[in-house]
Image: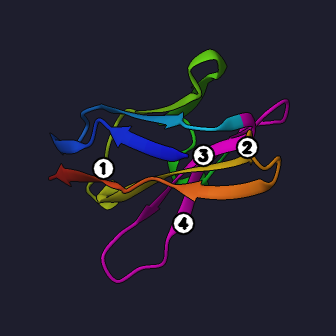
Amino acid sequence: VQLVESGGGLVQAGGSLRLSCAASGSIFSINAMGWYRQAPGKQRELVAATPTGGRTNYADSVKGRFTISRDNAKNTVYLQMNSLKPEDTAVYYCNAGLIRGDTMNYQDYWGQGTQVTVSS
């Protein structure tokens, strides 16, 4: 199983970016998918998460600006980021908690990370 992210880059403050993360491999079902970020010198923090059949939740700092969505048929999660601020600059990581199809065991996976840089 692997998670492949795309969509990061450099944008000016007030701009928008859309991140994508596709899960592939031996997947029976996905319990939840989400996005985390880590800025230099800081701990990794939750940005947004969408559990299957559950309520989506967001970090207070991104509420009203970021939107997480999923395409379950494609095992893909998206993060639409609007009104970006310099403090949103970080490496963004995709996360998925899922049941593997080959072992039927629950396992947690991370993407490789994608850099988002917001200039002032």
Q: Are marks 4 and 1 in contact (CB under 8 Å)?
A: no
Instruction: Report the span colored magenta.
Output: 28-56
Q: State which mark lies toward you, 4 or 1.
A: 4
Near-viewer residue (97 or 85): 97
3D distance between C-alphas at marks 3 and 2: 23 Å
3D distance between C-alphas at marks 3 and 1: 20 Å
Near-viewer residue (44 or 66): 44
**First in sequence: mark 3 or mark 4?**
3
Question: Dot 1 corresponds to which residue?
Answer: 85
Tag 1, which secondary structure? loop
Q: Residue at x 36, y 56 (%)?
A: 113
On the image, which quarter does residue 57 sit in? Answer: top right
Q: Amino acid at mark 2?
A: Asp
Question: Dot 2 corresponds to which residue?
Answer: 102
Q: Is residue 32 magenta?
A: yes
Q: Are marks 2 and 4 in contact (CB under 8 Å)?
A: no
Disc sitting over residue 34 in the figure:
3
Disc sitting over residue 28 in the figure:
none
Disc sitting over residue 45 in the figure:
4
Q: Residue at x 74, y 39 (%)?
A: 101
Q: Amino acid at mark 3?
A: Gly
**First in sequence: mark 2 or mark 4?**
4
Q: Where residue 33 appears, x then y in whole percent?
A: 64, 42
Near-viewer residue (33 or 10): 33
The answer to whether residue 25 is left or right of residue 97 is left
